[in-house]
Image (cartoon, grey):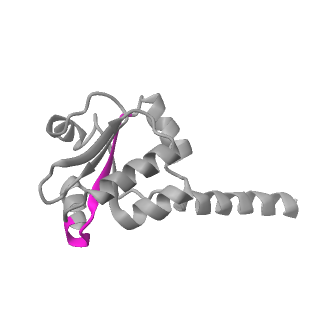
């Protein structure tokens, strides 16, 4: 019984640790995310998703938790996930050219303009390359 409890507790902690090693997304208002990005002189990485989007769910489960992405994205960007059908999402969907989901955008917080964007599921390697490309265009 003690061994089973130990295995359960260890599994919970291991899952929590691996979940924290990937991309950390801010849970703030869009205004606060922009302010944070300006103060830190970083671009905003926006994952524009919907709750019903299969590729969005797959990226959430398989791509965003990857340590290599967390190591790069958490240092270089202010990361935000926004459900484009809830809360501030519809207003952002009107502001930015969202043609499908997921749409991944890198936004200059000073101008509000898109630096780089891509539509659709991205592998860890593809997203890392996209992030590197966006970061190289940063003029903040």
- Magenta stretch in the rendered image: 38-50
**Residue 83, horizontal then vertical, whole percent:** 32, 40
Question: Is residue 130 a member of the stretch shown in magenta?
Answer: no
Snapshot quadrant of residue 61: top right
**Residue 31, horizontal then vertical, whole percent:** 18, 57
Snapshot quadrant of residue 28: bottom left
Question: Is residue 46 a member of the stretch shown in magenta?
Answer: yes
Q: Nearer the viewer, residue 134 or 4?
A: 134
Instruction: Say left or right for 79 vs 15.
Output: left
Quadrant that contains the N terminus: bottom right
Snapshot quadrant of residue 75: bottom left
Q: Quick one: which residue is furthest to the left in this view?
A: 111
Residue name at image x 28 percent, y 56 percent? 44
**Residue 100, horizontal then vertical, whole percent:** 32, 28
Residue name at image x 53 percent, y 58 percent? 68
Q: Which of 120 and 94 is in front in this view?
A: 120
Q: Does 50 sit above or below residue 112? A: above
Residue name at image x 44 percent, y 36 percent? 56
Q: Quick one: which residue is furthest to the bottom in this view?
A: 39
Instruction: Say left or right for 135 vs 11.
Output: left
Instruction: Say left or right for 93 vs 12.
Output: left
Instruction: Say left or right for 46 vs 96.
Output: right
User: What is the count of numbered marks?
Assistant: 0
**Residue 5, horizontal then vertical, whole percent:** 79, 60
Residue name at image x 23 percent, y 69 percent? 41
Q: Does 131 sit above or below residue 84? A: below
Quadrant that contains the C terminus: bottom left
């Amino acid at each position: 019984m003690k061994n089973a409890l130990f295995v359960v507790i260890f599994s919970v902690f291991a899952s929590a640790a691996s979940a924290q090693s990937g991309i950390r997304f801010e849970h703030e208002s869009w205004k606060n995310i922009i302010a944070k990005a300006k103060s830190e002189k970083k671009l905003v990485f926006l994952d524009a998703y919907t709750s019903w989007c299969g590729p969005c769910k797959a990226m959430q489960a398989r791509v965003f938790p990857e340590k290599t992405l967390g190591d790069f994205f958490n240092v270089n960007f202010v990361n935000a996930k926004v459900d484009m059908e809830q809360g501030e999402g519809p207003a952002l969907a009107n502001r930015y050219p969202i043609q499908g989901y997921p749409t991944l955008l890198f936004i200059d917080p000073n101008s509000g303009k898109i630096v780089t964007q891509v539509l659709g599921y991205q592998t860890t390697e593809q997203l890392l390359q996209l992030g590197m490309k966006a970061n190289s265009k940063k003029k903040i």
